Each structure stands twice: as structure tokens, then as C-alpha cells.
Image (spheres, grey):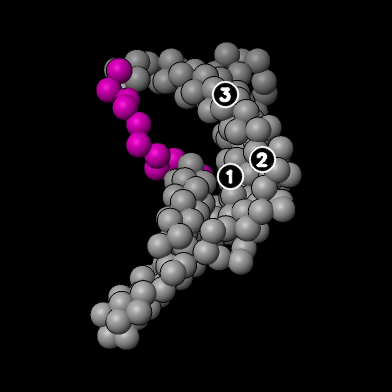
Amino acid sequence: MFMERLCKLIAQISMFISASCAGVLTVVMILQIFCRKVLNNSLSWSDEMGGYLLVWIALYGAVTALYEHKHLAIDAIVNKMSIGAQQKVRLIVNCLVTLFLMIIFYYSLPLMTQLSGMTAVSLPIPRSVIYSPLLITSVFSIVILINDILQDVKIIMDKKGGIDS
């Protein structure tokens, strides 16, 4: 129950951050258009900020999609399998994705350290802050996947009679 509430909180936080970034991106792009067309003076930082915001939207949005099980999937073959086989495939896929995210997390740590003294090209923001969603969203996704894996294992074990409900 704790894990389910934690995952829901993570998804809500991720959705809030993603939606907030989308709002900020909209305002920045409208401001850039206004400055370029009306004031005849482009903002030097808007393109860079727009790129970073798009990445943040995608990363935090991916966490929400993972929680809601709404990622794109090619499941034509899996859908033809028995329910038990589908659950086992889902468990294997979730384990592989968790492993991949652990690798991303592992390599993100030294990246944050290396980037701590650098700032963005046209923004006075440390690069470690700009790239921090890579680290944060990998942890968020790992937590959600661990919850899914535990649920899948419980379902598989219940069907085999290995664990009493």
C-alpha cells in the first residue's frame, strides 16, 4: 500500500513538473515571438531554454506515462499469448527496463559532478541543474517499476499457488 501511494505521488509530481514546463515553454516562445516581431530584437536565451524545457517535459511525462501504463508498445505477438505468458513477458520487460534505468542512474551521478561547475551557454543556470531530470526521473521510474514488478511477481506466484492471498 505504501509503494502504491508513493508511486501515485511520484506520478502527480512528475505530471505537475511536466505541465509547468509546458506552460513556461509556451510563455517563453510567445515572448520570443513578440520580441522578434514587434520589438525587432530576439531573445538570446529562448531557444536554449526551449530545448531544455522540451527535454524536461519528455522525461517527466515519461514517468507519468509509465505509472499509467500508457507507453507505446508493440504488443501484437504478446496479445496472442495466454494471460500467464503475458504476465511473465511483462515481468521480464519491466526487469530489463529497470536494469536500463539503473545504468542511466549510475552514469548520471558522475555527469552531475562533472557539470557542477559549468553553466549553460546563454543562461546563468548550472548545467547540473539542467541535466538533473535525467537522474531524478530515472529514480522515479525505477520506484514505479519496482512496484509493478512486485505486483507481477505476486500475481504469478498466486496463480501457481506459491503465495496465499
Find residue 7 and name its label.
Answer: none
Q: Is residue 128 visible?
A: yes
- Where 27 falls versus 67 (above or below)? below
Tell me the tag on residue 134: 1
Amino acid on which the number 2 mark rests in the picture: Leu
Q: Is disc 2 placed on a helix, strand or loop?
A: helix
Q: Quadrant of the N terminus?
A: top right
What residue is rendered at 67% in x and 47% in y?
A: 115
Q: Amino acid at mark 3?
A: Cys
Residue 145 placed where, x, y %? Answer: 58, 35
Queried whether the magenta region covers residue 76, the answer comes back as: yes
According to the image, label 3 marks what residue? 95
Badge 1 or badge 2: first in the primary sequence: 2
Image position of 41 with respect to 25: above or below: below
Percent coordinates x, y for residue 90 in the rendering: 47, 24
Instruction: Classify residue 100 as left or right of residue 74.
Output: right
Q: Is residue 145 above or below residue 157?
A: below
Which one is in front in this view, the residue at disc 3 or the one at disc 1?
1
- Residues 5 and 83: in front is 5
